[in-house]
Amino acid sequence: MKRSSIGSWAYTIGPYAADPIDFETVCDKLQQLGFQGVELGAFPPHPNPGNPNGPDDNWPGAMPEPSQRAELKARLAERGLGLSGMAANLWGEKLLNTADNSKYIAEFTRNAVFARDLGIGGIRVDSVQPPTILREIDYTTAMNRAVSAWQTCSAIAADHGLQIAWEFEPGFAFNKPSDIVRIHDAVNRDNFGILYDTCHGQMVGVKGARQEGEKEVFASQLDFIRLLSGRITHLHLIDSDNTCHKDANGEDETSTHPPFGLGILDMDAIMPELVRASRVPHDWWTIDLCFWPDAWSATAACKTRLDQLIAAYGNHREGASA
């Protein structure tokens, strides 16, 4: 049976950036709601490996010392909570618009050590730059840079017993279905896979949101999931209303993540296909309420719906008929 978790970043960024909910309060609530885990957004103010650019003094949530990390693990264990994964803070680095990826790899390594120390099994990455970067950089050059960096990071992750899950999104480069397959297959490492978010799946695979040039879309998300069969190694589950979250200038940024029931997705159609197409190496299913303006209040209802999905599909074996 699958275990339930939710991404902690829902309570620290976007609408919560000015008044984030501290990690201890988040974990208390998740324990009360019966979650079995939390997926860590490893950036301030939640626990993180420290300031990438200098001293950790006054860097909220910094845990540079092994003793701090051990204490966090113990506090989580007391609540009966595990850590389903980690979103690494790599957005301050350059990936596609530089020929030198050493700083990106160094910061990834720091995050890999942090994840290992906390007993986390996998790290989420993305392509960092927006899709418009491909107006400035040759497609093949940019792709080769991502592939090379992620091959190196996969080796580092393997040394620390970690998986890497690449989350494609409308707001990041390489957001066409063919891009996703091409890059995944070029990285070609056993511990490198695709993070499939059902909201991003809708916006990328069906709506073609923020795709440069000619759109690549499918009639339904089910066809997109079938294209990615065997490549999906981590799941984020949430609804979609066929819109993007807006940035500070009112422009489309990345997928809106409405709570279950406030969008148009038929999760009972999606889940069997998603289970068949996946090769998830763990037993976590994670809710993602990123950028939702009332994520804190919506958490309880989303947990109820996730429990229903787990009861219906959580015993099915990935890669087999559901």
Image: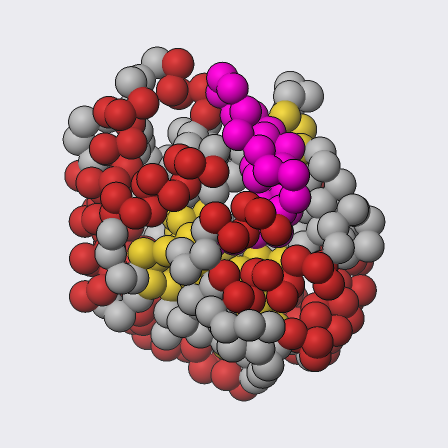
Q: Position of residue 104 (x, y in %)?
A: 26, 40
Q: Quadrant of residue 2?
A: bottom right
Q: Is residue 316 visible?
A: yes
What residue lies at 60% left-to-right and 38% top-to-bottom?
A: 218
Query: Which residue sits at x=26%, y=25%?
Result: 140
Q: Nearer the viewer, residue 67 or 274?
A: 274
**Quarter containing the C terminus:** bottom right
Report the residue at 30% width, 66% height from top: 162
Please give the name of the residue rendered at 40% of the width and 71% of the height, measured from the top-left corner: 281
Residue 237 lies within the magenta run: no
State whether residue 230 is above or below residue 128.
below
* 153 vs 89, nearest the viewer: 153
* Magenta stretch holds residue 205: yes
Quadrant of the snapshot with the N terminus: bottom right
Q: Looking at the image, can residue 254 be seen?
A: no
Left or right: where 210 falls relative to 129: right
Region of the chain picked out in magenta, as a range: 195-221
Quarter occupied by residue 123: bottom left
Colour setup of the view: secondary structure
Q: Is residue 293 left or right of residue 178?
A: right
Q: Position of residue 18 (x, y in %)?
A: 65, 40
Q: Is residue 247 above or below residue 284?
A: above
Viewer-side residue, 321 vs 121:
321
Q: Position of residue 68 (x, y in %)?
A: 37, 70
- Count of marks, rendered view: 0
